[in-house]
Image: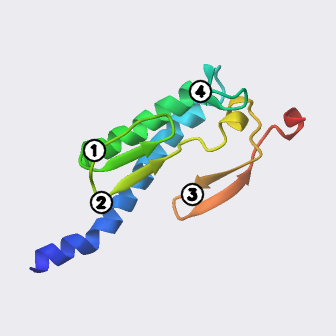
């Protein structure tokens, strides 16, 4: 009985740890893509973009989730799904602001400092206008 209650108590921490691991792993790849040409496609409307970086970061995140929790549901912006029925659902949008990312209009972003999230000013304000 103690082991079961300890497992339930540890579960939110384990899920958070996985979320942070996945975000960091995708973030490393996204940082590397910033200085390189991106393959850009349109999803319907002319201002609804998807890049190879969106797809690759989603694949990194969902791959880590599936490896540890194959029974969890996944709802991801670029279409990745998981199990059909589960009390758990991960909602994934790895690049929130694809248009800004694709056009290098990076005004502000959050980064993990090792002790907490910090906002930092980006580059490209003049290129947005």
Residue 96 position, x and y percent, is 62, 44
Q: Which residue is mark 1?
A: 83
Q: Which residue is mark 3?
A: 113
Q: CA distance from mark 1 to mark 3?
A: 33 Å
Task: Tell me which numbered mark, 1 or 3, is placed earlier along the sequence.
Answer: 1
Question: Which residue is more in the foreground, 92 or 81?
Answer: 81
Circles 2 and 4, Cβ within 8 Å, touching? The answer is no
Q: Residue 37 location in percent, x, y?
A: 65, 19
Vertical arrangement, residue 20 with respect to residue 2, above or below: above
Q: Quadrant of the N terminus?
A: bottom left
**Where does label 4 land, which residue?**
51
Q: Which mark is residue 127?
A: none
Q: Look at mark 2 in the image and give the residue it sits on.
A: 87
Distance Cα–Cα, label 4 vs label 1: 25 Å
Return the residue found at the far bottom.
Answer: 2
Neighbourhood count class around disc 1 (C-alpha, 10 Å): few under 14, some 14–19, many 20 upward: some
Tell me which residue sits at (33%, 57%) in the image: 88
């Amino acid at each position: 009985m103690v082991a079961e209650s300890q497992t339930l108590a540890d579960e939110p921490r384990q899920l958070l740890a996985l979320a942070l691991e996945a975000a960091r792993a995708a973030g490393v790849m996204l940082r590397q893509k910033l200085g390189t040409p991106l393959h850009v496609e349109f999803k319907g409307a002319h201002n609804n973009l998807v890049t190879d970086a969106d797809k690759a970061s989603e694949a990194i995140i969902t791959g880590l989730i599936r490896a540890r929790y194959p029974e969890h549901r996944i709802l991801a912006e670029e279409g990745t799904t998981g199990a059909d029925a589960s009390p758990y659902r991960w909602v994934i949008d790895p690049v929130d602001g694809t248009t800004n990312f694709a056009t290098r209009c990076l005004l502000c972003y959050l980064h993990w400092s090792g002790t907490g999230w910090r906002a930092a000013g980006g580059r490209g304000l003049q290129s947005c206008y």
